[in-house]
Amino acid sequence: MAPELTPSFPPPATVESLLLQYEVEQLLYREARILDDWNLDAWLTLYTADARYIVPTTDLPDANPDTDLVFIDDDYQRMAGRVGRLKSRHAHREYPASRTRRFISNVMVTDVDGNEISATASVAVWRFRAGESAPYVGYYDVRMRRVAGQLKLCYKRAVLDQEALSDHGALSIIF
Amino acid sequence: MDINNTMSDIPMYDSLVYDRPDLGQFKVHRSSMTSPDIYDLEMRRIFDRCWLYLGHESEIPNAGDYARRVVAERPLFFARNREGELRVFHNTCPHRGALICRSDRGNAPVFQCFYHAWSFNTSGELIGLPDADGYGPDFDRAEMSLRAPRYDIYRGFIFVCFDEETVPLREYLAGAAEYLDLVCDQSIDGMQVIPGSNRYSIKANWKLLGENSVDGYHVIPTHQTYFDYMDGQGAETTGSRKGFGRALGNGHGAMENDAIFGRPIAMWHPYFGEDARPQMQRVKDDLIARFGRTKALRMAEKSRNLLIFPNLIINDIMAVTIRVFQPTGPAGMDVTAWELAPAGESGNLLRRRLESFLAFLGPGGLATPDDVEALESCQQGFRAGGVEWSDLSRGMTRSPRGSDELQMRSFWRRWQSLVADLPYVEQYEHGLTPGAIPEVDPSPELAPSADD
């Protein structure tokens, strides 16, 4: 389950909260666009150096990656390794690369705690390759911080709604 | 038989494997991976007769715990009854057929069929049904209780068998039991399945994943990006590794190799971090104290990929994984994989183990997606025609190395005898028996730096 909404949600519609909503949406849209364009080096620049990117397994969406098996539990170094791999000709599931289109919606800024902003969003990624077409569907649970005036992601937990990776056989793209 | 003919007829069912140790030739007819008729034969003659992996005892530790599975297209579930004993059931109501267990896992004091509300206790006995007066005096509650397939447990691994005639599980496992022991002995407290499982499907014949899981020859060319990444992390995977392949009897096989770098079970490497060093040394010392130096170092420092016929893999490599694949047709399978760890392992040791698993394994890892692609690519290639036979002769004329294909030939020999209903004769090549460890060829094996 996505994190519970606090009783104070939604925040009052002040100019500040509307600006923040806009900023968060634009960051998530930008990430989607960058990934759809396979502009993977640019993807890394959206994240802080202490970032963590987690995708739980389909049967345990609330997994704790420190004690449970997940699909992906990357620190920034592993994220960079993933990018390096996907850029090579030897990531065979993605060479030639699939065509993807990401749809981000239902973006909600759920908490602002000091410097850290939390948000959730619904996501569908359509992926087309080798005659197959199927979506990955789920939600993002993200946290962001301002680094030198720029909003960056420091945590992304991308949770799949699928019961199994039946259509794609793998999670070979960044979700 | 002329294996060079280009006719596209499917050979007789007893001629699908061309096995000529005298010529160093071993070929498998590709119809075995594409034909619906052969698939039907496999379901009847292999999956209805062999011992098949169901699950691990640690998945249901408490009374009332249950988990459900599909094994060889059959819905089953297993549970721990009130007395703490394991029970396995066909997942169907004896009344009119509905599934009894409709969640993947959970805990329940009673299993109730939602259709007509028949209730069964955790031992499977029919304990209640609405308006029982509607049935005559000869209504037999025992006969209307949940049905159990034949099942047995080896060191926590639960297997089922749908044939009463098949040999007992321990005999069936033959030399594979030793390899399960090498995993289970790693912890004095036993091994447990970590919560969370990898569930994915591959559009390829099920046998291709069995081959792939014990194929040392593909590791370096297919998974180059994994080695590049690990080397970037200071793992130094470029050293030459040696090992051997084995036939373990009854179609089981294994390859055993020097570890790629360290291993979570007691082979420290700088990759794991300096803080892990004393912890891992303690685990290693404990293994030496319990099993002696030879066995302890084999457990700690060698990787093992084990294929238990027909569809179970236990890979004790950069982590321990249980991988089972259920055929869904000639060109499809559903895969489920778990991670196995010493019971009670926690903190840094467990985190390093999980991390080590995720770098390579699983559908989101840096290597497993390549295997999915390779298998589907083979399945598509089979449609191309022009080539009728696949070759599995590597290492047939030398002492079997880890990157050779003896362990796959072992699978296929058993497969051929079952599919064609032929008497089975063990053939180990080079006069090796299941108890014998092959001599390790001192010449270097393929190393990641090799550019071939």
Image (tube, rainbow, N blue to C red):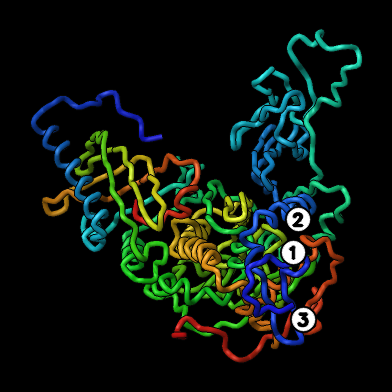
> How far is the residue under mark 1 from the one under mark 3?
17 Å
Are dots 1 and 3 on a single chain?
Answer: yes
Q: Which residue is mark 2?
A: B46
Image-quadrant location for residue B79 = top right
- State whether residue B196 is above or below residue B143: below
Label 1 crowding class (10 Å Cα cut-off): few <14, some 14-19, many 20+?
many
Q: Is disc 3 placed on a helix, strand or loop?
A: loop
> How far is the residue under mark 1 from the one under mark 2?
8 Å
User: In front: mark 1 or mark 3?
Assistant: 1
For the point 53% across and 51% down, the residue is B201
* Tag 1–tag 3 contact (CB < 8 Å): no
Q: Which residue is mark 1?
A: B415
Residue B57 locus on image (x, y percent): 70, 46
Q: How many numbered marks, from 0 up? A: 3
User: In front: mark 2 or mark 3?
Assistant: 2
N-terminal-most mark, 1 or 2: 2
Q: Is disc 1 placed on a helix, strand or loop?
A: helix
Q: Is disc 2 placed on a helix, strand or loop?
A: helix
